Image (tube, grey):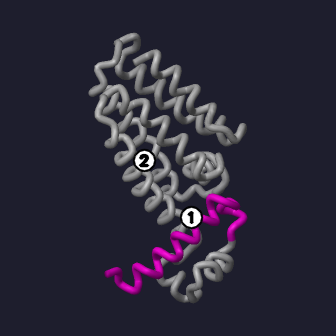
Amino acid sequence: MKQRGQVVIDKILDTAERLFYAQGYSNTGINQIIEEADVAKGSLYKHFQTKTDLLVAYIERLHQLWLQRLEAAVGEVSDPKGKLLALFDHHTKRQADRLFGGCPFIKANDEAYTDDPRFTSEIQRVKERSKSFIRTLVEQSGHRQLLSDDELVDTIYYMLEGSIVSASVFKTSAEIQGAKRIIEKLI
């Protein structure tokens, strides 16, 4: 059973996640979060002294959830090359679930307008973790060696990132699935 403090933190972070993603960090006020999370102002400030503290906590928690979901999706596939392609299927599903709103980390990075090093380093950590995850899959894939491991990691990473951005612009999964087809030819 969760401690009362953790329940409040989760309510605040759940609300912040929904609002920051839907309307942006800058367009979301603390009072709106307090109201929609149904918590007291003192409770929010007890756990998050500033809006930037809340932003950092949101990104850290989102990073953990992102990694858990990604590992679970890829873990459902046994074929090593199929695991690489599962990355694209996972992101297709996540984007469809989010109505093709784009990557929450890129969105936050682009519009939060903060130079807080905690925020910057956490966003960078997410993207570095993504490349590291891809690297592990590439090294285990037994790919065709048309590209070196480093080149294939970079290609998959850039295709995935770019196709997510394109999917958010065109509001369709075709962009991500098109990138998947290209990668399939390389592996």
Q: Residue at x 69, y 63 (%)?
A: 26
Q: Which residues are magenta?
A: 1-28
Q: Is residue 104 left or right of residue 154?
A: right
Q: Residue at x 59, y 87 (%)?
A: 41
Sequence order check: which comes first, mark 1 or mark 2? 1
Assess whether mark 2 and mark 1 are in contact (beta carbons under 8 angstroms): no
| Residue 113 placement (x, y as % from top left) | 65, 56
| Residue 112 placement (x, y as % from top left) | 64, 57
What type is the residue that disc 2 sits on? Arg
Residue bearing mark 2: 125
Characterize the local packing of mark 1: few (<14), some (14-19) or many (20 or more) Cα atoms within 10 angstroms. many
Task: Provide the secondary structure element on which disc 1 rests.
Answer: helix
Foreground disc of the pair 1, 2: 1
| Residue 178 placement (x, y as % from top left) | 58, 26
Looking at the image, residue 40 lies above or below residue 184: below
| Residue 81 placement (x, y as % from top left) | 35, 26
- Comparing 52 with 163, the one in front is 163
Q: Which of the numbered marks, if any, corresponds to residue 17?
A: 1
What type is the residue that disc 1 sits on? Glu
User: In which quadrant is the N terminus drawn?
Assistant: bottom left
| Magenta-colored segment: predominant secondary structure | helix
Residue 4 occupies quadrant? bottom left
Q: Residue at x 45, y 21 (%)?
A: 184
- Comparing 97 with 166, the one in front is 97
